[in-house]
Image (spheres, helix red, strand yellow):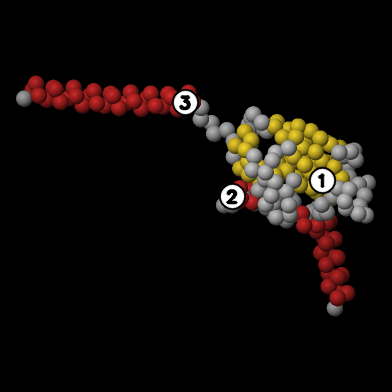
Amino acid sequence: MKLLLLQVSLLLFLLKTTNGEVLFSSLPRSLVVVASAMEGQVLKAGEDSITVSVGLNQTVTNQTDESFKKVKVKLCYAPVSQVDRKWRKTHNDLKTDRTCQYMIYDRPYDGKVEEFKWDIEKDVPTATYFVRSYVYNDADEEIAYGQTTNDKKSDNLFVIQGISGRHMSIDIASACFSAFALLSLVGFFVIEKRQSKIKS
């Protein structure tokens, strides 16, 4: 019975592999990812930057990076910013996963610790984030990962404050128009009242 279950599991795994499906749960955490953003820090889109370093996790035994061909680093939504937002939903199948939508680094893997600075783009929305990195093989499939947070994605999280689209000049202009509209209304009311008194 156990042998049969093992054969079925192996067959299902092979079918998934041939279909190009890569499951996040099947990836080893072979990378160490460190970001300069501190726990709870609030950064501004279009103004601030993050320094990120990515390298092989030396504490993992019996691993090799021979099949690592490319490294990509992405900005990812924390669970608190995924609630009631289907377009940010986490899926185990990486083809349908929407956790990490912002590419911040994409380079060939060279085996060294890679460090870079990423200027936060203006279109990044307000949310709580972490940073995750994947390494890819020759077939451009994810084969390992690393991230700045724990497995539950509950620590080392930071906030990016998006650009709201409103500026001080717009607020001042709208206040002026509101005041003008109110004064015009009062003025018309006073004139109307005087004219009605004159007629009577």
Going from N to C along the chain, the mark reached first, 1 or 3, is: 1
| Discs 1/2, front | 1
Q: Secondary structure at mark 3?
A: helix
Residue at point 24%, 26% (across, down): 186
Q: Which residue is mark 1?
A: 32
The amino acid at mark 1 is Val
Q: Is any atom of residue 35 visible in this view? A: yes
Q: Dots 3 and 2: beta carbons under 8 Å?
A: no
Viewed as shown, does residue 176 lie left or right of 4? left
Q: Secondary structure at mark 2?
A: loop
The amino acid at mark 2 is Arg
Position of residue 144 measured from the top left corner of the image (x, y, whole percent): 83, 50
Q: Is residue 144 above or below residue 42?
A: below
Q: Which residue is mark 2?
A: 85
The foreground one among 10 and 106 is 106
Quadrant for the N terminus in the image: bottom right
In this view, the residue farthest toward the left is 200
Work out how far the residue at label 1 is from the one at label 3, CA to CA, in angstroms: 45 Å
Binning the other alpha carbons within 10 Å of mark 2 as few (below 14), some (14 to 19) or many (20 upward) gives few
The amino acid at mark 3 is Ile
Q: Examine the image and state in which quarter residue 72 appears.
A: top right
Viewed as shown, does residue 185 lie left or right of 1? left
Work out how far the residue at label 3 is from the one at label 2, CA to CA, in angstroms: 30 Å
Q: Which residue is mark 3?
A: 170
Viewed as shown, does residue 8 lie left or right of 156? right
Binning the other alpha carbons within 10 Å of mark 3 as few (below 14), some (14 to 19) or many (20 upward) gives few
